[in-house]
Amino acid sequence: MKENNRRQFLKSLAGLSSLAASAVPAISVAAGRSAKVQDIRLSSNKDYVRLVFDLNTVAEHSVFSLHNPERVVLDIKNARMSHGLVDQVQANSLIRSIRSGVRNGNDLRVVFDLSSDVTPRSFLLAPSGQSGHRLVLDLHNKNKSARVKKSAKRDVIIAIDAGHGGKDPGATGRAGTHEKQITLQIAKRLEKTINQQRGMKAVLVRKNDRFMRLRDRIHKARDHHADMMISLHADSFPDPRARGSSVYALSVDGASSETARMLAEKENAADLLFGDVNLSVQDQMVKEVLFDLSLTGTIESSLDIGSEILHQIKSVNRVHKKKVQQAGFAVLKAPNIPSILIETAFISNPREEKNLRSASHQKKVAKAITRGVNKYFARKAPPGTWLASAEAEYRVNEGDDIKTIANNYKINENDLRARNALFANSLVAGQVLKIPVS
Ligand SMILES: [Zn+2]
């Protein structure tokens, strides 16, 4: 932490105690047995987001806010919560993420990362009817009018991970091309094409030729609140005839998490875990990336994204495997960021190596991936994003064209295309278009 930031951090901490006392009535209860959070439920309406913590007994708690970035911290005295419970709470347009940890040995701290400034209110509810003890936390949005504004609809964030880097060159082609170079070049082109799309924002995990640990790559994507992570690689095989692109996602079957963790600590973990997957043995990093992605991947979403991208890549390059490949092993942690790994081509194949180096081919690959990403998010954008927004639906009539429909709704033609992932000019009668929020 930089000196400046540290000072600011300390300053904000100093202001906390008074804020907590004045803004939120902390409810005092007699200290009893240790409380357990059994469930967290979330609901939202126009004015606030409500979180209900189901407890097995009464508990003392306090709430305070932190700013830049906006956070609300909930401390529950002498309480605990099973790991992964916060991961089950769906993020929404206000709550970006929820973290929890143990404080002072047996207190529970829950931190809400927020997209805007809120006034928190909290209270306890005694058991009634079917319900037991409850702690209710309401987050009132201070800037209510901002939510309906254009800027309130956030972009979906795509983390682009250029494989290898620095002391780890990855695979090397016959002409001497290093995998780490072409993954970075394609990553930068992909960043550009994605950022040209309304409602999408790309973040490069690695911006230059440097070595990065896998864990740090995932953390970087998390820090940016990525909705998707795309890891770029180039394949390699002893037989120079091997060619084509492949897309990998993960499967849920396989070893238990404990076994998988132990295997990960061993050198041969990747071989054991990927023994049934046709991966070139040389690319240790691919295996490790796949292994690590398992910590964060939402399998079904990953497969869905993967097949959209694979479908688009078909127009640019032959595909090595017709389906999204899955590596079979346990998901170690609650799903978080859907992630896929793309082997763009075989760097060990002289013709594909030449393609991989070519600027025009790299652009085509970047565009194909962008189309796939857009196709996916046009259907499944997270709530609160511009790509999930729709003011109306329009059923296409015979003879309609995109431009006229956009004009009729007074929206930008490109916005209409982006929202519906329309790449061609032709529309099909009966097709339903989402009319985005302008
Ligand atoms: Zn690689």
Image (cartoon, rainbow, N blue to C red):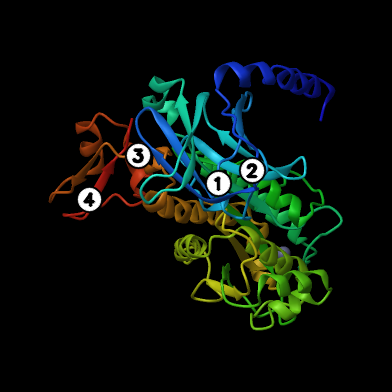
Q: Closer to the camera: disc 1 or disc 4?
A: 1
Q: Are marks 1 and 2 in contact (CB under 8 Å)?
A: yes
| Disc 2: which residue | 32
Residue 1 visible from this viewpoint? yes
Mark 4 or mark 3, earlier in chain = 3
Which amino acid type is shown beneath numbered disc 2? Gly
Q: Is residue 168 left or right of residue 389?
A: right
Mark 3 or mark 2, earlier in chain = 2
Residue 282 visible from this viewpoint? no
Q: Nearer the viewer, residue 322 or 290?
A: 290
Q: Residue at x 52, y 62 (%)?
A: 302
Residues packed near mark 2 inside 10 Å, few (<14), some (14 to 19) or many (20 plus): few
Q: Residue furthest left?
A: 398
Q: Is residue 246 above or below residue 61?
A: below
Q: Quadrant of the C terminus?
A: top left
Q: Nearer the viewer, residue 341 or 125?
A: 125
Please state the horizontal and vertical placement of residue 220, each as a whole percent of the image: 69, 45
| Disc 3: which residue | 389
Which amino acid type is shown beneath numbered disc 1? Thr
Q: Closer to the camera: disc 3 or disc 2?
A: 2
- Spatial CA distance of label 1 from label 4 is 51 Å
Please state the horizontal and vertical placement of residue 385, each as a whole percent of the image: 43, 39
